[in-house]
Image (spheres, rainbow, N blue to C red):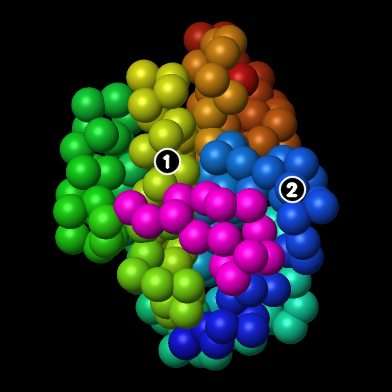
Amino acid sequence: MRNSKLCNMRYIRSMVLSDDWSTRHSVLANARRTAALINILTGTGDRQPQPEAVAEVLGEYGELEPIEISPDDVARMRAAALLLREVFAAGHVDAAAAALNRLLLKHTGPPRLTSHGGGTPWHPHLDSHDDAPWDEWFLASSCLALTVLLWDRQSPPGGVCASSSCQNVYVTQGQGPARRYCSRRCATRERVAAHRRGPGSTAGA
């Protein structure tokens, strides 16, 4: 379980950095953090990732050192990640909304506002308290971010990479053509493979 000292550190130093904080903890940034955590937690097949690997991803998205995560925390976060994958795999806004509604009903509490003891701007949470365990925080904060994205865009908040050799999830860009791959690298690999297969085989962006 996260202690209050680490929790207050989690959301960065002081109110004078509120603009920077808001950028790093925007809905879109939180949704991208969700995707990155799902990928590290579920992208190793049946093997559980090391706590250090999960902590590294959290650090990349604004968490401050020390990030203390145990193997048991990772196991519970992995279970949460598998639930969240259902939202990305939905494929249609109605199915994504239904998946989110199930998660919101079973795994989140009522909305509340917190400033983490005055250390951050006020912002919403769906977990039970500021010292909630990692898995509860991950699932609740992810549901909140993905719900707002779906609401704002009226489309699925993300998808699963169409590459046969990659099952990473990604957050959609909002505007523009539909996205099929988690990265340019996967899109390029599939285009090369389609070219080698001959005419009639294509891979979208």
Q: Is residue 12 magenta?
A: no
Name which of mark 1 and mark 2 comes first in the sequence: 2
Does any portion of residue 39 appear in the rendered image? no
Mark 2, secondary structure of its residue: helix
Mark 2 highlights which residue? 18
Which residue is more in the foreground, 17 or 118? Answer: 118
Which residue is more in the foreground, 8 or 154? Answer: 8
Does any portion of residue 108 appear in the rendered image? yes
Report crowding for label 2: few under 14, some 14 to 19, many 20 or more residues within 10 A (C-alpha): some
At a point 71% along the width and 31% down the height, the residue shown is 184
Mark 1 highlights which residue? 146
Q: Is residue 119 magenta?
A: yes
Mark 1, secondary structure of its residue: helix
In front: mark 1 or mark 2?
2
Residue 188 sits in quarter: top right
Amino acid bearing label 2:
Ser
At a point 30% along the width and 25% down the height, the residue shown is 93
Q: What secondary structure is the stretch in magenta mostly built from? A: loop
User: Where does the image place residue 76, in percent across and percent down from the top left?
Assistant: 39, 78
Cα–Cα gap, marks 1 and 2:
22 Å
The magenta span reads 111-124
- Judge left or right: residue 91 versus residue 132: left
At a point 62% along the width and 41% down the height, the residue shown is 26
Report crowding for label 1: few under 14, some 14 to 19, many 20 or more residues within 10 A (C-alpha): many
User: Where does the image place residue 48, in percent across and percent down from the top left?
Assistant: 49, 79
User: Where does the image place residue 102, in percent across and percent down from the top left?
Assistant: 18, 49
At a point 27% along the width and 44% down the height, the residue shown is 100
Amino acid bearing label 1:
Leu
